Amino acid sequence: MAVAFYEIPNTTRLKEVDALTIPRARKLAAAILRQRAFTLVELHRHDPSGSEILVIDVETDAVPPNNQAGIKFRERLALYVPQSPKKLVEARTLRKDFPVLAHENATAPGDPLSLCLYFEPVASVLRTWTPPSFFRRIQWWLEKSAKGELHPADQPVEQLFFATPLELVLPWNFVEQRKNASHRFVLGQSVKRPDGMTFFAQAATGALQSPSTALFEISLSPIVHGVVEREPDTLGELADTLAKRGAELFTPLKESLAQRITDQGEMADATQKTVFLVYLPICRKEGEAPERIACRAFHVNAGPLSLGEMIGALIQHQGRYFRNFDLKGGSPPESDQWRALTVAPLEVLLENDAAAARRQSGIKDHGPEGVLIGVGSLGSAILNIWDRCGWGRWTVIDKDHIKPHNLSRHTALLKDLGAPKADVVAQLHSMSRRDGTVTPLVADATELQNPVVCEALRKAALVVDASTTLEYPRAVSGEDGVARHLSVFLTPSGSAAVLLAEDNDRLVRLRCLEAQYYRAVIQEDWGQKHLEGNAGTFWSGAGCRDISVVMPYSQIMAHASLLAEQIPLAQGRSSASVRIWERSAQEGSMVARQLALHPEQRMKFGEFDLFLDEGVEHELRQFRTAKLPCETGGVLLGYYDFNINAVVIVCGLPSPPDSKESPDFFERGVSGLAQAVNEATRRTAGVVGYVGEWHSHPPGHGSSQSGADIVQLCHLAFGMSEDGLPALQLIVGEQDIQIYHARAILVT
């Protein structure tokens, strides 16, 4: 029996290989002459496109005889070589009865089938493409298709239709919206692209400014994956294609159109559009459970009422449409007018919600109901990252607004000038997702008596402070009944990021973590330049306080990305922590540090609360032990904060080398002391300084004051009164530690 081949239209026959002008065509022809299994039959030039065509016969020894797929040992192919070197060479089958199989590209009706040879993007294929490898790929496709092995078992089942350049984006909560009978949908569209267009379906209630679109959902019976079908041009072609695969369209379409009509009927609306969504379960094999439910939308060039009348689902009476209760059975009406209606296929996409964002980001934890304090440069960048990956639901608190200079390192845009920062970041969130996981609160977070602020802090599961100031973390450390707090900030130069994390029970609060962080900065080698100044400052306004630091947005983003990853990890740990990351902008390297932490102690001194952690006590005892049996001592470093009426002891310095120490006497020296105190103040950017004295008692003695100690405290009180501060005296005894304070009262 003679084999019938397709004729190649619109071409000029070339007589010899030298007539080929496209370099890849010449290379293919030369390679064919060296291949035993390939025979060059004809050469053509396609007149409209200028591409060149090599007609070949290919023999594949591994193709089984009489295989179920219907592929022969020898097949005739046409290799279409485009002029552009950035396009792939296409292989088309010329045998007219070549079987329709999976992994074939879409072609026009009546045209030769096109082999889908590659899974990778075109650019990736061209990177290593050669004529011999191309020939091996053709033989591989023929062999695997003949054996039924072309589609691996672990590869997802094939979709029913080829991709379409048109898209329909549904709302993220479409499943909920479609349950509301009052919702109608408006179909918007994007700017037309060279390769297609995107449409958007949005629910609307009340009067519509644009024609609404009737969205119908049709669930069909399962099909077995296999051939990828060409997109239909008409509703009749769609019904035929589905029927061929065992899925009937007509009956569910008729039922869907009829169900939307109430007993009162509906007036005709000539402007209304029709889009129906087809849900099609796809199985890998007959009888198996569906592995996926494909969804494809089809835009029909008829309104839903007229379409319903065409297929017999509706009848028209006195200008209104009613359900046709007399229609029996599921057979199409005799008129085939509905079959000629043109359809435009649309790829169905769904707007992202938080769950989709987490899935795409590989994040399993949905995140907390949290509060973010401060959405300036650092806070807005961190929130933007969490927003993109769907982590957490956030109430953002910030009292400031966007100024022109903020745009150099903020997520805000030019249109946001003058708007509150909290409102801006919430609006930006709504422009990337519509699920409302960011709630703005324009307020001063330090006003903890504000009922709105207080309620947010108490209801939250986590509070992240990115205010980059001292006021909020110190103030909230004195508040009970609020959520666990984490605080993040960058050093003035932008070279390091710091994370302070309270424990779950808030036994070690931000105030205590701050003090232990300063102690490490003072005592560790890395702290020497850790808090050194920034690259400069600039005036951002006319006021004397309108000063901003110079820092590139790249530094903000580098640390924001790190902190956006580390904060969820810190939240997952129940213990308190202080972590520091130092980054070298020149090398792009990062060094991570973690501090050993200690519980806090609190004492009431008149109007002041005094705080120190057990690490201070441990160090002072080590100083005492090192000098036994002699007494020893030194100065206390810390800071006062009159906003919260607190004094915090950060650490103690050992005795200066010129001190006088004996078993029953101690007199502190001064050698190098001023330099040590000044260095501590410099390292902590002016926060930590001298707050008092400490000394030890010899073995067998407690920490009660001696007469000499009382005299010393009086002298300290007079000295500190010049700065309006009380004096502190800490005594380390055999078993205990006591702290004394005194304030000089000047009588006039």
Image (spheres, rainbow, N blue to C red):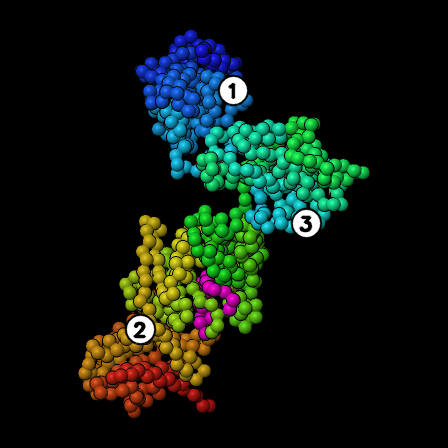
Question: In this figure, which residue is indicated by the disc labeled 1?
Answer: 111
**Region rendered in magenta:** 458-478
**Can the viewer see residue 713?**
yes
**Residue hosting label 3:** 182
| Residue type at numbered disc 1 | Asp
Name which residue type carries label 3. Ser
- For this view, does 656 lie left or right of residue 177? left
Circle 2 sits in a helix, a strand or a loop, which is it? helix
Task: Please name the amino acid that badge 2 sits on.
Answer: Gly
Of callouts 3 and 1, the N-terminal one: 1
Relative depth, front residue between 406 and 364: 364
Q: Image check: 173 left or right of 46? A: right
Q: In the rendered view, would you say 270 is above or below 577?
A: above
Q: Is residue 267 above or below residue 382?
A: above
Disc ID at residue 615: 2
Q: Are marks 3 and 1 in contact (CB under 8 Å)?
A: no
